[in-house]
Amino acid sequence: MSNAGRSKQPIPQEIIEEKIYLVRGRRVMLDRDLAALYQVQTRVLNQSVRRNLIRFPDDFILRLSREEIMNLSQIVISSKIKHAPSVFAFTEQGVAMLSSILRSSRAIRVNIQIMRTFTKIREMIQNNKDLKRRIDHLESKYDRQFKVVFDAIRELLDEKHAGKAKPIGFLR
C-alpha cells in the first residue's frame, strides 16, 4: 500500500492513548507525538504554534522545564526528547486549537480521533468514580464482614486508574 493510502487509515485509539501523559496534573500530548501523527516535522508544528501564540493561552499549552523533559525522557520511547531544547505539551483544548492552524485534511482527521480519545478517557475516569461511589454505598449498607471484599475492589480500581495516569514533573 502506498503512503498516501496509509495516511487515510484511522490511527488506532490505543496508539493515541499511549501518547497522552499527565504533566502538572493535566492530560497532555507532546509536540513530537502530535507532529508524527500529523505527519509533519516537529519544527514545522512548533513554528506554526509560535506564529499563532495568541491562540494558545497557558491552559492550552505548557512549555516543559528541563527537569520535566528529563523525567519524560524516561517514559517516552524516543530518546531524542532528552536533548530537545524545548518541548511543548498540548492540553485537549490546545490540540483542538491546532486544527485551526494546521489545515491539512490529515490534521483534521487526526484531531477528530484525538478528541474522541480524550472523551473516552474522561468517560472511563467518570465511570471509575461512579463505581467507587456505588461501592461506598454498598459498603455502608452491608455488614462489616464484606469489608475485605470492598477493600480488594477499591485496590483494583486504584491500580487500574494509576496505570493510565503517567505523572510527570511538579504538580502545582
Image (tube, rainbow, N blue to C red):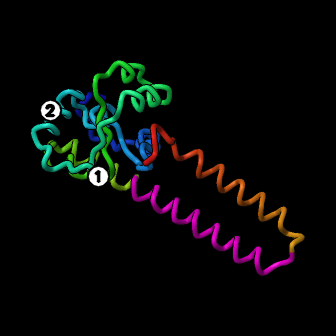
Q: Nearer the viewer, residue 54 or 30?
A: 54
Mark 1 belongs to which amino acid? Asp
Question: Which numbered mark, 1 or 2, is in the foreground of this view?
Answer: 1
- Give me the residue at 47% from left, 29% from top: 71
Give the prevailing secondary structure in the magenta stretch. helix
Amino acid marked by disc 2: Gln
Gap between marks 1 and 2, in whole Å?
19 Å
Q: Is residue 120 magenta?
A: yes
Q: Where 25 sits versus 72, above or below?
A: below
Q: Residue at x 28, y 23 (%)?
A: 85
Circle 1 is placed at which residue position?
59
The image shows residue 129, relative to residue 56, as above or below, that is below
Residue marked by disc 2: 47
Q: Are marks 1 and 2 in contact (CB under 8 Å)?
A: no
Q: Position of residue 20 (x, y in %)?
A: 42, 43
SS at mark 2 in the image: helix
The image quadrant of residue 12 is top left
Residue 6 seen in the current view: no
Number of on-image labels: 2
Residue 5 point in image, percent of width and height = 26, 35
Residue situated in front as seen by the camera: 60 or 157? 60
N-terminal of the pair, mark 1 or mark 2, is 2
Q: Residues within 10 Å of mark 2 (few under 14, many from 20)?
A: few
Quadrant that contains the N terminus: top left
Specify whether 16 is left or right of 167: left
Residue 115 in sight from this viewpoint: yes
Q: Where residue 137 appears, x then y in whole percent?
A: 70, 77
The magenta region covers 118-143
